[in-house]
Amino acid sequence: MKKAPNIILVGPMGAGKTTIGRLLSQAMGKEFYDLDKVIEDNAGADIPWIFEREGEDGFRKRETQALSSLVQSDKENCVLATGGGIVMRDENRSILNDGSVVVYLYASVSQQLYRTSKSSHRPLLQTGDPKATLRKLFEVRDPLYREVATLVVETDARHPKSVANKVLDAIKRHLNTETSIS
Ligand SMILES: Nc1ncnc2c1ncn2[C@@H]1O[C@H](COP(=O)(O)OP(=O)(O)O)[C@@H](O)[C@H]1O
Ligand SMILES: O=C(O)C1=C[C@@H](OP(=O)(O)O)[C@@H](O)[C@H](O)C1
Ligand SMILES: [Mg+2]
């Protein structure tokens, strides 16, 4: 029998990947992984510490390693929330494109800013002007999210539960179309 595809969430910081991923996994009865948490568990240190000691490059190496071992480890039936920079490496985009259902959670820059402002755990946003940083990252990354996405779901002005339901409906519709006889 065909394996159930993994569901992978991509999108910018503050799109709600971690929050929606957890809700979605519960609703679908799938196991949930947050890639940032996997990286932290593997490193025995948190993300700000990794950025401080190893720089962004060190973090990206760990991120690719965690992604490839999770997705290529024959894991099935899981929901994976990635970090916002996952699409930056070609190698990562190839892994994402290899049989998973990839959902791009879209959020406007102002929503990203609002939702990330309560936490200081994102090293890339510890700048004088986080809005300008988010805008620059969005310009580079939005086309890459769209390149890997199977589905795009808008999250602005929606409660997390409502976003999760919208994602669920979009996945069901996608899988039904994929398996129906034309
Ligand atoms: N649809 C939403 N509406 C309002 N707040 C949200 C929504 N999705 C996530 N949040 C909140 O935004 C913050 C960042 O969410 P998170 O899931 O960590 O985003 P990401 O993993 O994409 O960076 C959290 O405080 C979360 O509760
Ligand atoms: O956009 C990025 O490059 C990053 C996003 C973060 O994850 P979230 O998107 O879950 O905040 C985390 O992986 C790290 O701080 C780098
Ligand atoms: Mg997250």
Image (spheres, rainbow, N blue to C red):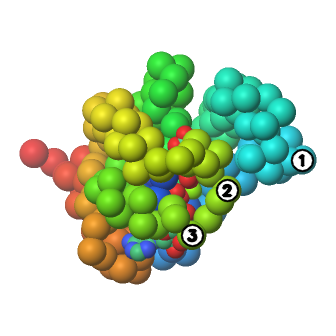
Q: Amino acid at mark 3?
A: Lys
Give the left or right position of residue 158, taking residue 8 as reference: left
Q: Is mark 3 within 8 Å of ligand 1?
A: yes
1 or 3: tag closer to the N-terminus? 1
The residue singled out by tag 2 in the image is 121
Quick check: can you spot residue 155?
A: yes
Residue 144 in which image quadrant: top left
Secondary structure beneath label 3: loop
Q: Residue furthest front?
A: 128
The residue singled out by tag 3 in the image is 118
**Cβ atoms at labels 1 and 3 below 8 Å apart:** no
Label 1: how many Cα within 10 Å (few below 14, some 14–19, many 20+): few
Q: Nearer the viewer, residue 13 or 124?
A: 124
Residue 94 lies, in percent from the top left, at 47, 24
Residue 87 lies, in percent from the top left, at 46, 32
Q: Amino acid at mark 2?
A: His
Q: CA distance from mark 1 to mark 2?
A: 16 Å
Q: Residue furthest left?
A: 182
Residue 153 lies, in percent from the top left, at 28, 58
